[in-house]
Image (cartoon, helix red, strand yellow):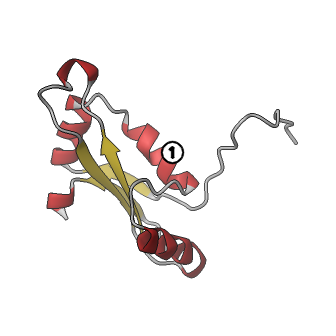
Amino acid sequence: MINTPSNTPQRVSRFELGELCYTPGAQDVLNRYQVNPFDLIARHVRGDWGAVCPEDAQANEEALRFGARLMSVYELPAPPLDSATRDPAKVWLITEADRSVTTILLPEEY
């Protein structure tokens, strides 16, 4: 057993991710907004659902118990040098009910 200090956040995976994929649109946005996709994946697998509504957060918690689809929504701020010219972007992470695949996509690609 590894002892960790009490102020160190635990990085616990709450479910299997399966194969990791992203759409071309999501890849483009992540590149333009300088976001590492693995940072979003780490949040998703810990159960940080991002900017979902309370009902969707509750649905995700139930999905963990009953084996349904999981969805997170993350709002990406514009990169500092482009913040005046670029609006925030939104990406979704969806893990299928059978936990075979997790996809990063844009809302309009759903």
The percent coordinates of residue 108 (x first, y second) are 14, 59
Is residue 11 rendered to the left or right of residue 1? Answer: left
> Dividing the image into 4 quarters, which one contains the N terminus?
top right
Q: Tag 1, which secondary structure?
A: helix
Residue at far left of view: 85
Residue at far front of view: 84
Residue 33 falls in image quadrant: top left
The percent coordinates of residue 27 (x first, y second) are 22, 40
Name the residue beneath numbered marker 1.
42
Residue 40 falls in image quadrant: top left
> Dividing the image into 4 quarters, which one contains the C terminus?
bottom left
* Along the viewing direction, whichever of 70 and 73 lies nearer the viewer: 73
The percent coordinates of residue 63 (x first, y second) are 51, 76
Q: Amino acid at mark 1?
A: Ala
Is residue 99 rendered to the left or right of residue 75? Answer: right
* Along the viewing direction, whichever of 11 and 83 lies nearer the viewer: 83
User: Is residue 110 shown above or below 27?
Assistant: below
Question: Measuring 33% from the left and 33% from the top, which residue is drawn there?
Answer: 35
Question: Measuring 28% from the left and 50% from the top, which residue is drawn there?
Answer: 91
Residue 56 falls in image quadrant: bottom left
* Along the viewing direction, whichever of 75 and 45 lies nearer the viewer: 75
Question: Measuring 43% from the left and 53% from the top, which residue is drawn there?
Answer: 50
